[in-house]
Amino acid sequence: MLHSQRAKRAVSATLYIVICIVLLIFFIAPLWSTFIGGFSTYEEVMTGRFHMLPSPFQWNFPRLLEMTMYPPFFTMVKNSLILTLTAVPTVLFSAVTAFGLSRFRGYGQNVIFMVLMSTMMLPGIVTMIPTFIMFKNFGWIDTFFPFFVPTIGGNIGFVFLMRQFMRSIPKDFDEAAEVDGANYFRIFWKIILPMSKPVLAVTFIQAVIGAWNNFFGPLIYFNKTEMYPLALGVNLLRNFSVVRQEWNVILFAIFLSTLPMILIFFFFQRYIVEGVVISGIKG
Amino acid sequence: MTENIAVKPLKKRPANKLQRRKAVTMYLFLLPSIIGFLWFTVYPVGRSLYMSLFNWNIQGPQEYVGLANYKHIFTTDKVFPLVVIATVKFAVYSIVSGLFLSFVMALLLNSKRRSVGFFRTMFYLPCMIAGGAPTIVMWAYIFAPDGLVNTFLKNFGITGPNWLTSVQFALPAIVIMSLWGAGGAMIIFIAGLRSVPVEYYESADIDGASYFRKLFKITLPVMSPVILYNLLMGVIGALQVFGQSYLLTDGGPMNTTRFWVLYIFGSAFNAFRFGYASALAWVLFAIILVLSVLIFNTGARWVFYGDNQKGN
């Protein structure tokens, strides 16, 4: 009896580790090979003679420098950073909305909430075409306006998370502040917003990642290559090399443009995971 | 009736004034989102519906054609059936395999082993960057004729296909890419598994229930709301797949990866048929709406809500 149980446990432990390692290869090998490929010579990449570890002496500096000349790599970095700034107004406007939806009773805010939530089912492409035409008529092509102006509506997913969080803050805080003569704007700014730091962090990180990864927007709103963020530029690099696709250079660019997100992930892992969990379980 | 009108305001006036001020304050807070909603949702949605009744290439005059665009979609458009097939195929394959994979990963990582945290981090990492263009371009390298996948297969004596230009393998390749982001659903499943009451398993253990019996009789029913959520999100997401086919296959080979949104995008921004693209977008919207309602309603039948939540 005891013996068979131990055997069972050994089998399940072996199964666990084998499946996990297979999955680990599936999830990590693509990134690892990108990393290695980015630090290899053209010949090495094209013949598939891989090293398991990057060899710094193989760095192809002239080629990498070439890459920074055209398309201008640091311009793309700058553009990506500007786009990630949209995270600030997105989070702020979402918080304002969540406050309005969570700290008041009555007045029909639940209806408003349901209407806003229902837009999650709306495919982005439906609104994308008329919005594009509108912004084109405004003369906003090749500007950052199409990315910053729509943040006024916030992000409905964030509003949901923040509303959930703010509802759990006791009403006593508002009432005490009201007795002290604070108005709702002070309550929002001085009490609720500071207390909502965890959910603000979660949504801010998500917004940064979303803005960094976004390429549908840049694809239609940017015509000039000097407006391109990394998300578009990497592909430009692929199309630009007509004679031969210099995969070592492309892989290096992919590595550079995903590195910030990977670092953010490792630093803020706890917050990121929390956000995903809240939206999934309470939804 | 008249009595009510006469009495109520008199009685409640002081409170009403405060109430009204509160209401005004609330709507001040909601003002940005209402503006955003009207400007970037209501107006574009209406405009899109209106545009779908016209032929328009954005430069010239708008020509009213009634429902002709919709009629064209369902009768004479030769590409549209292929678009539907490609999109449905992708949705079914990616959702079924994605839910299965993420659920299995969640079951594996819901134990008390010490390595669980490490694997969870590593499995989740890709889904953060999977949607971005750089990692999609990375897959072009991995699925290249002599890329990582085929090099790996060569070790077993298998000559891999040229994935992204093969009629047979282009769609499966994109499904595999989508599985790379399965970590997101996994995290949600893990959180769901944590909320299953331990007593259920304890009493099942006393009865001598096997692992799979517990899985099918306890875990799956209790987890059904989470499965419903992941299914719904999966359907909404999969029907809007775009980046992979735009960057890697451009809808080819032979339209096997021409997904719905890519077709809309092409109709609008390459063929400049903005009216037709709007009609296509509206058909997609209608389908997502119907599917969401359908999933939600049938969900009432197979989704198990805990006793304490029944009221909701």
Image (cartoon, rainbow, N blue to C red):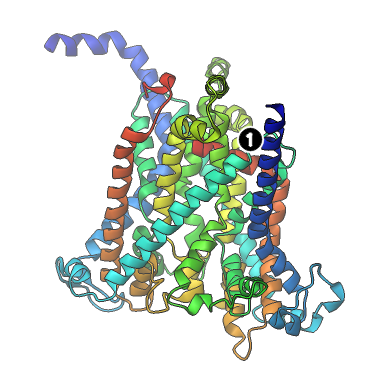
Q: Quadrant of residue A138?
A: bottom left
Q: Which residue appears farthest toward the right when viewing the image?
A: A57
Give whichever of A236, B18 is nearer the camera: A236
Q: Picture coordinates of residue B93 (x, y %)?
A: 43, 58
Q: Quadrant of the C terminus of chain A?
A: top left
**Left of A107 or right of it: where is A213?**
right
Q: Which residue is mark 1?
A: A198
Residue at 36% from the left image edge and 58% from the top image edge: A127
Q: Residues within 10 Å of mark 1 (few under 14, many from 20)?
A: some
Mark 1 element type: helix
Q: Which of the two residues, B73 or B52, is positioned nearer the viewer here?
A: B73
Q: From this view, report whether residue A101 is shown above or below residue B46.
A: above
Q: Is residue B240 visible?
A: no
Farthest left residue in view: B2
* Residue at x 70%, y 68% (from the top left corner): A33
Q: Nearer the viewer, residue A131 or B229?
A: B229
Question: Considering depth in this image, is A122 or B208 the residue closer to the camera?
Answer: B208
Q: Amino acid at mark 1?
A: Pro
Image location of residue A198, percent across then percent down: 63, 35
Residue B48 x %, y %? 28, 61
Q: Would you place residue A112 above or below residue A173 in this image?
A: below
Q: Quadrant of the N terminus of chain A?
A: top right
Residue B23 appears in the figure:
yes
The image quadrant that residue B54 belongs to is: bottom left
Image location of residue B84, percent across then percent down: 31, 65
Residue shown at 29% from the left, 38% from the top: B297
In the displayed structure image, the side of residue B109 where residue B309 appears, left or right:
left
Asked if A41 appears above or below B27 in the picture, the reply is below
Position of A63 with respect to A123 (left or right) is right
Q: Tally the numbered discs.
A: 1
